[in-house]
Image: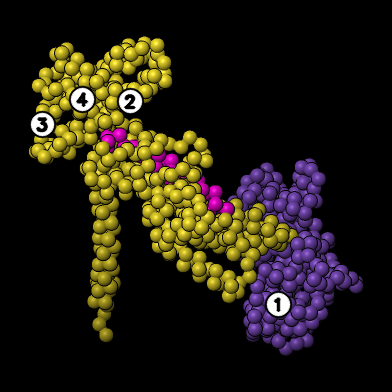
Amino acid sequence: MTQTSLLRQDKRTAKRNRAEARFKAYGLIAIGVGLLMLVILLTTIISRGTGAFQQTYLSVDVTFEDSRLDKTGNRDIAEISRVSTFGYKPLLVDAFAQLVESGAVQSDLAPKDMADILSKGAEAQMRDAVLADLTLIGQTVRFDFLASGRVDGYLKGRVTRDSIVNDKNISAEQLDLVDELRDAGVLEKKFNIAFITGSDSSDARPEAAGFGVSMVGSLTMMLVVLILALPIGVAASIYLEEFAPKNWITDIIEVNISNLAAVPSIVFGILGLAVFINYMHLPNSAPLVGGLVLTLMTLPTIIISTRASLKSVPPSIRDAALGVGASKMQSVFHHVLPLAAPGILTGTIIGLAQALGETAPLLLIGMVGFIASNGPDSIDAALLSPNSAMPAQIYEWAKRADPAFYERAWGGIIILLVFLITMNFIAVMLRRRFERRW
Amino acid sequence: MAKKSKISAKNVQVYYADNHAIKDVNVEIEDNTVTAFIGPSGCGKSTFLRCINRMNDTIDICRVQGQILIDGEDIYDPAVDQVQLRAKVGMVFQKPNPFPKSIYDNVAYGPRIHGLARNKAELDEIVEKALRRGAIWEEVKDRLQAPGTGLSGGQQQRLCIARAIATEPEVLLMDEPCSALDPIATAQVEELIDELRQNYSVVIVTHSMQQAARVSQRTAFFHLGHLVEFGDTDKIFTTPEDPRTESYITGRIG
């Protein structure tokens, strides 16, 4: 037998060390690929979505002439409200004519065509202002109007002079005007709070579409899920984990809870359609129904995580409580549940985050689609009137034809991700904060 | 000196599913006495101990037959409420298991749920008394609101003993209370057990024969589910009757 030295690796050791180094390299590559994908995902979302938070506005002085709005001059609101948005269009044309006359901009366009660079909602914006405050009539008021989606796209680089050759909605002359207005400092991109707070808009007005109402829809559903799924889930888990006898019935229940957690969400959607809408006749597209469906979907997640955190409470704590003469229920509620609470909350938040991002079941209960109404004004309305949800709104925008909506879909994704990341962050913090050692 | 019998077990059988863990055990445990259960691992001594306060009820597959009488009352009678029983028969476990709450709350928990104190002052008094009898008062009196889990192992175990005696039990069961402790903490706990004998009937399960010899007056030797021999500690360790007992205490089986 030859003398072996510890200073030299023998063949087997060298081979083993090489294998270990290789395995570590594979792990690093895997993590690297994962991180790269995350970076690509985030940069794509942010680069495409941030545009949605800015919108092009044009400041114009509008003179509300009596002759156009209140011919009799007696300021009768019933009479003035009879003037439709069409009646306000001439005011806008006048305003543009005034702009050219004052020498601020030069353009050969007819004032009527100039006014077309604004959003189709401009007239309604004026009319709402007048009806809210009749004293405006006769005065000159400065308005910040949304520019049309095409003009906004032009400022954001999405629309170019080449791309509008066949576009009936905007002409090269109008873009020239836009350039002049921008140089004059009356047309500019500004932060657009309406995107975060507003409601969806029709196909013709992508510039006015907002995410707010669908956010309310999502939050209402989350409220329903929280109120129903948390107590039901926790009660079911406590019973199964602490009280139920271990026999074939509880085995079957356990297996089926795990199965339910794996059921595709669209199945819950069709179940909701059949049970809540067709059988129980709850209203279509209502966040209440959406919340019920998502509750069904979230329950298994909550039950599984609650049971896991109950299991992780050491049995010695239960023994200690029983040993001093606590009843089973006292031992659970005084000792086990408080220790399991952080885990239960973490599981609940993660279940809610899952539900928040869920789209498929909403397709089937009609929560996807154009919801132009303003936000609900009462809790009843929030629960029962048709609404959308954040992921459904993103889906809705992504499938519309105008690329201006596409940008808003990405913007919506940013908001949704902010919600999800916040929720997961809270879950992690809770776990950190209340983690106990025995 | 004849003491009155506190616990009397008659033909006790325990089954874990099909496994016959305790076979026909008859034993009389006296008041104001420390009784030690010794025997090799898996001999059933802990199982039998847990029968005395019905902790085995928490295990689904466990069945108990026969009679265990405390003060002449059968604790397996259907009319007996386990919770009342456990208030009367306290237990200290192998691993110190304080609640992850303050030292004060650990001790006060039992009296609170049993309504032993009418007001805060009474509760304070009970807690102090229990901690004093648990021989830990001097060490913790200045930090009663500190978490019980922050104490050392030996202090935790004495805290658990204080917690067990705070509910004024009549019998104290101890399941290898020193197995997780160092020799100094063990000595403190053993001293405490000897003092507790004044007021309670103490039953202790132990793996250490020296400990059994030091703290107990009566010793029961279990082997393979049978109670092999039961008698005065001195006699068991000096002149055992059964050859199995002798083999065990001299280290040949176990």
| Residues shaded magenta | A205-231
Q: Which residue is mark 2?
A: A84
> Which of label 4 and label 1 is nearer to you?
4
> Which of label 3 and label 4 is nearer to you?
4
Label 1 packing within 10 angstroms: few (<14), some (14-19), many (20+): some
Seen from the viewer's position, the closer of residues B148 and A166 is A166
Quarter of the image where one finds residue A65: top left
Question: Residue sitting at 26 percent across and 71 percent down?
Answer: A19
Q: Are marks 3 and 1 in contact (CB under 8 Å)?
A: no
Question: Residue sitting at 50 percent across and 55 percent down?
Answer: A276
Q: Are marks 3 and 4 in contact (CB under 8 Å)?
A: no
Q: Colour of chain A?
A: yellow
Label 2 packing within 10 angstroms: few (<14), some (14-19), many (20+): few
Mark 4 element type: helix
Label 4 packing within 10 angstroms: few (<14), some (14-19), many (20+): many
> Which of label 4 and label 2 is nearer to you?
2
Mark 2 element type: loop
Q: Is residue A418 visible?
A: no
First reached walking from the N terminus: tag 3 or tag 4: 4
Mark 3 element type: helix
How far across and down, in percent of the image, does residue A17 sit?
27, 70
Chain letter, disc 4 residue = A
Q: Which residue is mark 3?
A: A172
First reached walking from the N terminus: tag 4 or tag 2: 2
- Residue type of the residue flagged with mark 4: Ala
Q: Which residue is mark 4?
A: A115
Q: Which residue is mark 1?
A: B63
Quick check: A258 above or below B253?
Answer: above
Q: Which chain is purple?
A: B
Q: Is residue A391 magenta?
A: no
How far across and down, in percent of the image, does residue B220 sit?
76, 77
